[in-house]
Image: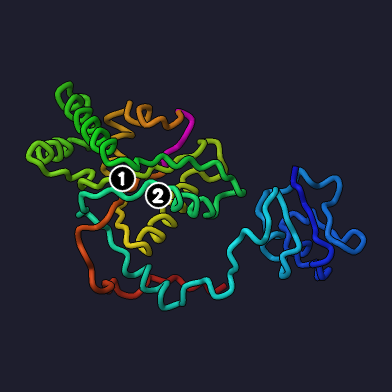
Amino acid sequence: MMEFIVDQEKCTKCGECATDCPYNIIELSPEFPAIVSDKEERCIKCQHCFAICPTGAISIFGKKPEDSMALKGGYPSVEQMECLIKGRRSVRRYRDEAIDPEVIAHMLDVVANCPTGMNNKQLLFTVVDDAEVMKKVRHETMEGIREALITDNIPSGMEFYDKLLEAWDNGNDVIFRNAPHLLIISTHTDGPSPIQDTIISLSYFELLAHSMGIGTVWNGLAQWAMDSIVLNMKEKLCIPEDHLVGYMMIFGKPAVKYHRTVQRGDAHINKVKL
């Protein structure tokens, strides 16, 4: 049930909720907003009506306006946002210190608000929030790579993993960088935009993490290993078979500090003129 409730004492009958509804399922009926009787099933749960009401008169899905954050004065400045985007670095040196699991859980709750295709909120956040578990993930992944090399089951083009295993045996963790945490985001393969949804959510996580002083790096080496070499790792991590893994990210408290943004040059822009 939508539980669409209007506080008539607060409602100013401005009609913004009806105007902004993507599927036009709200009408002023006759004075106050209401759901059109035969259109409720078209709701995509975007909560635009909930967010746009200037007086907080609308509740929906059991959500109350007073439990939301006010937007006024809450956004970072343009300069702060630019600094965050330009200052973000791929961190490959981490302190041997875990992040509080409650902090990680809160971060994932925030990132769950990221946009997805057709408001498909079926993203699965597979996270290693225990540093000891992370050690086991690293060990089992590397031993899986070792077994594949011994049995000559390395896919063509991935022979370079023998050098990564050699580095591992010499105490250099090139794949996981000794990071204490791992985040894998997946979703159903039959979703409207599974790859895009997972990449968008990881991008949001990365920016949130860096705003909190937490380092991240997109981990293609781990992704390729679990996709093509150590095929049982995703099962061990309890990722459903019908899920597509968009990408993986390691994160933790940085053991390095950067002091300025880099300068990558001007953007390559194609201005459309018809």
* SS class, disc 1: strand
Extreme residue in the right direction: 30
Q: Quadrant of residue 268?
A: bottom left
Report the quarter where the N terminus lies: top right
Residue placed at 52% from the left, 36% from the top? 188
Residue drawn where x is 17% and y is 21% of the image: 151
- Relative horizontal placement of residue 128, taking residue 112 as reference (left or right): left
Residue 242 painted magenta: yes
What residue is pinned by disc 2? 104
Would you say 164 lies left or right of 27 here? left
Q: CA distance from mark 1 to mark 2?
A: 10 Å
Residue 261: % across, % down: 28, 73
Q: Quadrant of residue 266?
A: bottom left
Which of disc 2 and disc 1 is earlier in sequence?
2
In screen coordinates, is 16 left or right of 172? right
**Residue projecting furthest to the top:** 151
